[in-house]
Image (cartoon, rainbow, N blue to C red):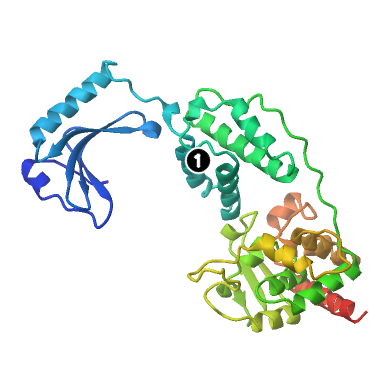
Amino acid sequence: MPKLLLTDLSVRTLKCPEKGQIIYWDDRLSGFGCRVSQGGQKTFVVMYGPREARRRKVVGRYPLHGLKQARELAKKTLAEISLGIIAEPKRGDITFAAARTKYIDQAKSRVSRRTAADYDRLLSKHFAFGKKKLNELRRDDIVCCLNKLNSTPSEQAHANTAIRIFCNWAYREELIDQNPVDRLPKLHKLPSRERVLSEQELAEVYREAEKYHWPFGPIVQLCILTGQRRGEIGKLQWDWINLSDNTITLPGEQVKNRQTHRFPIGKTTVGILDSLPRIDEYVFSGRNKGNTTFNGWAKSKRDFDATLENVSSYTLHDLRRTFSTIHARLGTPVYVTEKLLNHASGAISGVAAIYNRHSYLEEMREAVDRFEKFVKALQRE
């Protein structure tokens, strides 16, 4: 925010913002300033309190109150705070909503966009504390919210993780005096999924995806043929696709491990991409025009699955696991499969992991061609 020496002349000539409000802070008295609205209204304010729980108090309205009078009132207010006559806000006075916004802003620099968005969704949807002060947050409040998710254990586990990480962050940042998740019982770890589609199931899913409408049908096809995560396919951009060498490059900020991922695509995948409409920068645009990505996962998956006759319950992530399993069956080396999935499990570790910078692009290309031929053969059986 702008800072300048406030004088009678400068206050009279302060510029109005195009929208909202702007505060011009006084260079002479820290915490004192003049707030100017879009409509030209000028108000003298004083700000006090720690950075995470700052408050503003109006000390005059221009021109009813002059600059000199407002500055004296601001000095008096700051003196009363210093003497304890006016209670200074504590760090814990920050609201849950404000702290959540602050946390998500910081998280975006440490984790992937998808992870930050997931945390934001979980905290906003399942912990509706809103304007509740952080220091008023109790263990029972959190337990009550988690108990409402007993019927959805997976969502409950994710919500539990999100609130733990958030509260631990708030305690480290000294936004709260006590951590409400210290004695929170840990949920049993969910067993890892082991679902792998059979060859017959994979063939049926692929056949239906070929006939199914845009965008979900092609999304399923690409999930099967590339083994990438559904979110990475859903957010695919045309600029990431290089049809001169038949590769796709996913930027680091778009993938789970934050490592740029370049992988080859086969002729079948290229053909699918060539057949898709180009609406904007995204391969699979959202319903609302204006550079949004596809996000109708639940309904689209439910409607698509209704067309299947001989496939038991599965998730799109199971297609990724099936992709890996079939590559093992086809004899693809583990380290090549890991390269395709952008998921290192330790096949190349230690000194080799540090010094081996080989891209394995040709090895991946051979594996992709074998896999596409395998899927194509399934359709003939």
Name the residue located 13 percent from the left edge and 32 percent from the top edge.
Answer: 70
Q: Vertically, is 350 above or below 187?
A: below
Helix, strand or loop status at disc 1: helix
Residue 202: horizontal and vertical position, in percent?
Answer: 85, 69
- Position of residue 209 in the picture relative to residue 202 (left or right): left
Does residue 178 appear anywhere in the picture? Answer: yes
Name the residue located 10 percent from the left edge and 50 percent from the top edge.
Answer: 13
Q: Between 45 and 5, which is closer to the camera in this rendering? A: 45
Q: Vertically, is 60 above or below 83?
A: below
Residue 28: horizontal and vertical position, in percent?
Answer: 16, 34
Kind of residue at disc 1: Arg
Q: Residue furthest left?
A: 9
Residue 196: horizontal and vertical position, in percent?
Answer: 86, 59
- Position of residue 287 in the picture relative to residue 368 (left or right): left
Q: Vertically, is 328 above or below 169?
A: below
Displayed quadrant of residue 48? top left
- Disc 1: which residue: 100
Q: Between 82 and 137, which is closer to the camera in this rendering? A: 137
Name the residue located 69 percent from the left edge and 69 percent from the top edge.
Answer: 263
Question: Which quadrant is home to the C terminus?
Answer: bottom right
Displayed quadrant of residue 89? top left
Residue 72: horizontal and vertical position, in percent?
Answer: 13, 27
Q: Residues within 10 Å of mark 1 (few under 14, many from 20)?
A: some
Q: Residue furthest right?
A: 381
Does residue 366 appear anywhere in the picture? Answer: no
- Position of residue 233 in the picture relative to residue 337 (left or right): left
Displayed quadrant of residue 11? top left
Name the residue located 86 percent from the left edge and 73 percent from the top edge.
Answer: 203
Number of numbered tags placed on the structure image? 1
